[in-house]
Image (cartoon, rainbow, N blue to C red):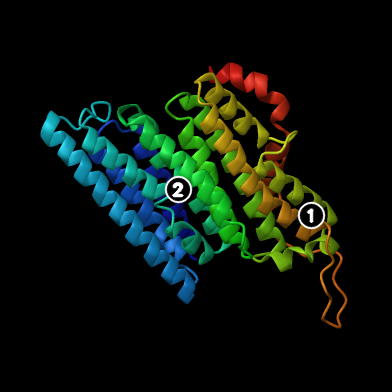
Amino acid sequence: MNPYVLAILLSSLGLGTTLTFASSHWLLAWMGLEINTLAIIPLMAQHHHPRAVEATTKYFLTQATAAAMIMFASTTNAWITGEWDMNNMSNSLASTMIIIALALKIGLAPMHFWMPEVLQGLDLLTGLILSTWQKLAPFALIIQTAQAVDPMLLTALGIMSTLVGGWGGLNQTQLRKILAYSSIAHMGWMIIVLQYAPQLTLLALGTYIFMTSAAFLTLKTSSATKINTLAMVWSKSPILTTTTALVLLSLGGLPPLTGFMPKWLILQELAKQNLPITATIMALAALLSLYFYLRLCYAMTLTISPNMTNSTTPWRTQTTQSSLPLTLSTTVALGLLPMTPAILMLAT
């Protein structure tokens, strides 16, 4: 892609998200979401592969549906209350519709069906943008409107997302689909605690972005898109294999890695709110996700791929990619757990 065009598209992505962050008016927020969607569509379809075009079309249709629902709900709210301000969502029907539309935008279950299909059709870097940056603007709106929504709806969305995200990834062999289901499960963890401690939602979103970035950048470096490709990575770059296995375990939420921190704090908060059954369901749903992360770790570190070719396997992968983003995201994804007290001090 032409670098000037790429620069315009990436700056439009930034502009759309910033506009949504800064707005307290529903029309401006809607405009930011639309700029975001329109900026990523050329990036998604840039390879002109039939699967990429199909994924782009599916993404455009779902995002347009969600944007239309947001517009309809905010217009209804403005019609009843007389103002477009986000903080005045007194109409329960409008606020429920907006949360459902935003859930469709970020891929919460049961509005998640587009997410694995779209991610599977994209290259890894566009998939990374879709899984991280594109979640920010809708999440900002969800956090602002969550207090006006029925708590049971948020709890149902959270529990269903963690269960679907864990259950859906079990029988997948495509790494991008596994990361899509992983994303759905993580979104569930963020939504479940939103009504009790929004700062924990932001903490979970931040750690999720770093861990997912590390996972996507690792797969990009090793050019892996399927589980059986992962089995051949260890002979090319053993250190990368080690860090990848640890990043996957961090995504699963195992101590002493960064991914344990948000899960631990969210379960603690749910216990404080006298919701032991919800906390138990969430912890058990996390085990489902952990199973498929362990499956990836097993394929990478404990299996030897059958060598069907006559050529010798290269010991090092020749790459021209910058390793700095991978290094930074991997370090953050593995080593932040000791910082938990400091992060809690900042969060409260």
Secondary structure beneath dot 2 equals: helix
Whichever of callouts 1 and 2 sits on the residue coming sooner in the sequence is 2
Q: Amino acid at mark 2?
A: Gln
In screen coordinates, is 58 left or right of 98? right
The quadrant holding residue 346 is top right
Q: Which mark is residue 241?
A: 1
Q: Is residue 166 above or below residue 200?
A: below
The quadrant holding residue 82 is top left
Measured in 3D between alpha carbons, the distance from the residue under mark 1 to the one under mark 2, in whole angstroms, is 28 Å
Q: Position of residue 152 (x, y in %)?
A: 38, 33
Say few, some or many: other residues with alpha carbon within 10 Å of mark 2 (under 14 / 14 to 19 / 20 or more): many
Closest to the observer, 86 or 269? 269
Secondary structure beneath dot 1 equals: helix
Q: Position of residue 56 (x, y in %)?
A: 41, 65
In screen coordinates, is 184 left or right of 9? right
In screen coordinates, is 312 left or right of 58? right
Q: Position of residue 170 (x, y in %)?
A: 62, 57
Q: Position of residue 90 (x, y in %)?
A: 21, 27
Residue at the limit of the structure toward the bottom, as seen here: 310
Residue matched to label 2: 134
Labels 1 and 2 touching (C-beta < 8 A): no
> Residue at the spot x=71%, y=56% of the render?
296
Say few, some or many: other residues with alpha carbon within 10 Å of mark 1 (under 14 / 14 to 19 / 20 or more): many
Q: Is residue 249 above or below residue 256?
A: below
Q: Which mark is residue 321?
A: none
> Residue at the spot x=28%, y=44% of the render?
30
Residue 48 appears in the figure: no
Q: Amino acid at mark 1?
A: Thr
Q: Is residue 320 above or below residue 153?
A: below
Closest to the observer, 347 or 115? 115
